[in-house]
Image (cartoon, grey):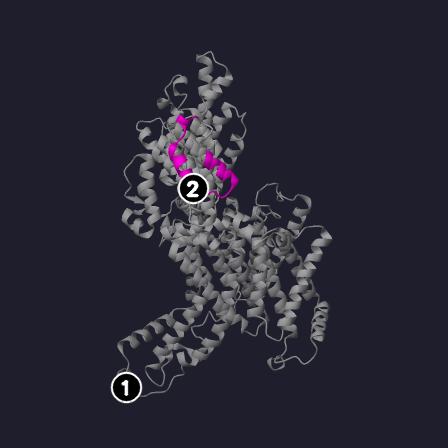
Amino acid sequence: MAFFRHTIHVVTTLLLVAVPGLIAFDCGGFLPWSHWLLSVLAILFVILVTVGHSEDHPKWDTTIHGADNDVSHRHADSPLSPPMGAISFMFQSSLERLMHWTPLILILVFAAVSLLQTLSLDASVVRWLSPASADVFQHWLPKALGIAAPDRFTVSVSPWLTNNFTSRAIILAAFAFVGGRLMTNRHFVIAMMIGLALTGLLHAAAGYYQQAVSPGVNLFGVTRIGRPFGPFVNRANAGAMLNLGLAAAIGLLSARLHGRWDYPRKRQRGFHGSFRRLIVDRVRAILLDRPSLLISFGIVFIVSAILACGSRGALMGLVAGTIACAICAVSTQKLPLFLVASVGVGLMALMTLGKTGIEATSLERFLETSESITRDNARLRHWPDGLRAATSSLPLGGGMGAYQYTYLPFQQTGGPNWFLNADNQWVEWFTEGGLPIAGAMLVALFSAMVALRRLLEASDPANRGLAIAGVFAIAAIGISQTFDFALTASSIALAATLLAAAIHARAAKTQAAQSLAAQMPHAFPKPRIDHSDHVDRMSHASRIQQVVRAWIERFAAIPAPFRYWSGRIAVAVVFLGMLAWAQHQTRREAMAYAVVRNCKLQLADDALDYPTLLELEQRVDRAIDQARLCDPLLIQQCLVQRRLFRIERIGRLLDDQPISAAEAVRRTSLELIRVNESLLGDPPLSDDPRLRRITDLSRQTLQRCPLSETALWNLAQLDFSEGYRSRTPAILEQLSRLRCRNGDILAGIAATAWQMGEKETAAQAWKQLLLVDAKRLPKVFQQLSKTEGAIRLSQVLPDEIGSDDNHASNHRQLLLNAARLQNQLPADQQDPIVRARALKLLQIPISPAERELKKELEEE
C-alpha cells in the first residue's frame, strides 16, 4: 500500500511539472479554455495528492518519537515544564507550517480580496473601501442612465473580470497546495527543476522555429502587433517563461556541481593556484560529467532564445538574475570564475544566434538611446495614470482583473491606446487590489528572502540548487515584470507558483528538522517518578496549564489514523468545493469567450445574410442566459442588433420609397442616424424594437460595467427614448474623459456632439484634441468653419498646458499657427481673442517668420 501511494505521488509530480510548458502552447495560456483545463487538472491533482504519500514522517502512532514520548503519560521535573514546553513546541511547529504554506496563503489572500470586491455592499462601505469605484457608481452611472444613485454596488468596476480573476486565483491556490505537499520530497524538487528547465528548452526551440519560419506570426497563425515568439502571442511573456526555465537550469547545474566538487570550508578560504588553472579544472570537470555538460548546453540555448525573443524586460531580468546570484550565492573566491562563466555563456549564445542567422533583437532594442525610450515608450508615460488610479482607489482598489477600466477616469499623460494592462505587474496589482495586495506582495518578498537564506545555508545540494534557482527567478521576474504583465498568463503564473511552493516547502522542512529536534526533549520530557499525592502535585499548576495539559491528552487519545485521514480529507473537501465553483466560472468564461470570438469573426463579414444574423442573435441570447454578468456578450448582442436594424430598415426604405440602395445605406448610417431621422420612414425610431433593445442592452451593460465605452456610444447614438437629450451631453463628456488621450476618438466625439447640437461638448472635445495632438489644428479649423461662427476658434484652443520649456514652446507654436490660419479668413470672421493672444506672445519675436506674422497682425 505504501508503495502504491508513493507511486501515485511520483506520477502526480511528473504530470504536474509538465503542465506549465504544455499550457503555454495554447497562445501562452491566456485563453479562457486554458483556465478551464487547469481547473479540471487541479481537481485531479488535489485528489491524487490527498490519496498518495511520499514523506517519511510518523503518522500511525500517537507518539512523536516512539513510545517513550507518549504525551499522555508525561510530566516534568516542574509542573510548569510540560505545558509550557508543549506550547513552545506547537508555536514553533506552527511557524514552520506557516513558512511551508506561505505561497498558498498569499494566493488565497488574492482570491479573498477579489471575492470581496464582487460582493454588493452598502454605498457608504464602498465609499470607504474604494472612493474611485464609489464615484463611478454614484456619479458616472446616474448621469449616463438618468437614474438615482444606487444604494448598493460592488467595489469592482467590472465584476465579471474580477470573478474571472477569483477563479484563476483559486486554481493557482490549488496548485500551490499540491506543490507544497509534493515538494517536501527532495527527489520531486529535482524533478520539478528538470521539468521547468525542459519547458524553457522546449519554448526556446519553438521560438527559434517560429522566428526562422514565420516571424511576426506565432505558431498558430495569430498575427499580433506585440511581435510573438514561439506559441506566445507576446514576446515579453515568452521572455518571462524562458527566464523561469533558465533559473531552473542554473539551479540544476549548481546542485550538480555542489554535490560533486564542493570543497570543505577550510579549503575555500583561499585558492593558492593560478586562476587559469582553476578555470581549466572546472571546465574539464564539466566536460567529463555528461549531465553537467547537457545542462550547460541548455543554459546557453535558453540565453540565446532570450536574446532573440526581442523583450528588453526579459534581457534586463536575465542580467538582474545573474547579478543576484553573484551577490547572494557565490563566494568571494569563486566570484571571478562565476563572472568568466557568465560572459562565456553570453558569448556562446551570441555565436549560436550568428550560426542560425537569427538576430539578437532583445540586445539591439536594449541598446537604443535612453532618450528615445523615455520619449517614445507609451508605457512609461502611462504608469503615472495607473498610480493616480491606485491612490484614488485606496484602500481596496478598483477590482482585481479590471485594470482596463479602473485607470480610465485618471488619464493625463498616457498614450492614445486603451491599456488592457499596465505593462507593469506591480502597478497593475496595486491599482486593482490596493493595500491588501501591496501588503501581500511585500510579505511574499520577505518570506522568499527568509526561505532562500535557509536553503543557501543548507548542506543538501538539492536545497542549494533550488535556492540559486529561486534567487535568479525572483530577481529576473521582479525586474522584467516591471515592464510587463506576464504573471497574468496562467502558464507563467503556474510555473512561478510551483517554484515558490518548492522553495518554501524545502525551507520549512530544513529548519523544522533542526529546531524541532532540539525542542523535542524540552517539549515532552521523560517522566519522573513522584509518589506524592495528586492534589499536591497539581497545586503548583495554574488553571490554564491544566486546560492545556487536558487538551494535549485528549488530542493524543484520538486514534492516529483518524487524525491523519480526517485532516487530509477535510482540506481536500475544502479545495474541491472551491475548485468546483472555479471550474463552473472558467467554463462560463470559456463559453462566453467562444461566442464573443465567433461573433467578431462573423460580423467582420459585410456580406453576412439575414438568416445567419438571426441565428447568431439566438446563440448570443443563450450565452447571455448562462453568463448574466458577462458584459462583452451584451456588447456583442448590441452589435448584432445594429446590423439587424440596418438590414431591416434598408429593406423597408427600398420597398416604401423610390430611392437607390446606395441612398438607403447612407440614410441608415448609424453615425448619422439622428441627422437622417426624418428620412427613415416608419416606424419612428423611438418605437423601433431593434433600437429599443440596443438601448436596453447598453443600459444593462453600464449597470454591470459603468465605464464601458461601447455602451456609452450606443446610448449617445441610438437612444431615442424619452429624456435622452438631457443625458446625451453627460454621456459625451464621459466618453471624452475615458478616451481623452486618443485623437481619433476625440474627433469623432466632437463631430457627434456638433451633429446633436451640443456646442459646448463639441468645443471641449476639440480643445482636448488639440491638447493631445496639436498637429490636428488645420482639420479642427476646417470643422470650425462649417459651424458658421457658432464655435469660435478661441473656444477650442487649450490654455497653458505646462510650465516646462517643451510644453511652453508647443503651446506658443499652437497659438501662432492658429493666428496664421485665421488670417486666411475675412476680417469679420476672425476671432479677436486669438489675435490678441498671438500679439501678446509676439512681443518678443524669436524668428523671421514670427516677425512677419507680428507685422501682419498689427496691420489688421
Q: Main secondary structure of the magenta part?
A: helix
The residue shown at (47%, 11%) is 658
Looking at the rendered structure, the kind of residue marked 2 is Leu
Q: Position of residue 459 (x, y in %)?
A: 57, 75
- Reading the image, the residue beneath label 1 is 533
From the viewer's side, name the closer residue of 500 and 821. Answer: 821
Can residue 154 be seen here? The reply is no
Looking at the rendered structure, the kind of residue marked 1 is Asp
Q: Callout 2: helix, strand or loop?
A: helix
Whether the magenta-drawn stretch holds residue 365 is answered as: no
From the viewer's side, name the closer residue of 227 and 180. Answer: 227
Can residue 753 be seen here? The reply is yes
Which tag is nearer the camera, tag 1 or tag 2?
2
How many marks are shown on the rendered structure? 2
Task: Choose the circle earlier in sequence order: 1 or 2.
Answer: 1
Magenta stretch: give its range. Answer: 826-855
Label ID, residue 841: 2
The residue shown at (54%, 73%) is 458
The answer for how far apart the CA atoms under marks 1 and 2 are is 104 Å
Q: Position of residue 138 (x, y in %)?
A: 30, 42
The residue shown at (59%, 61%) is 319
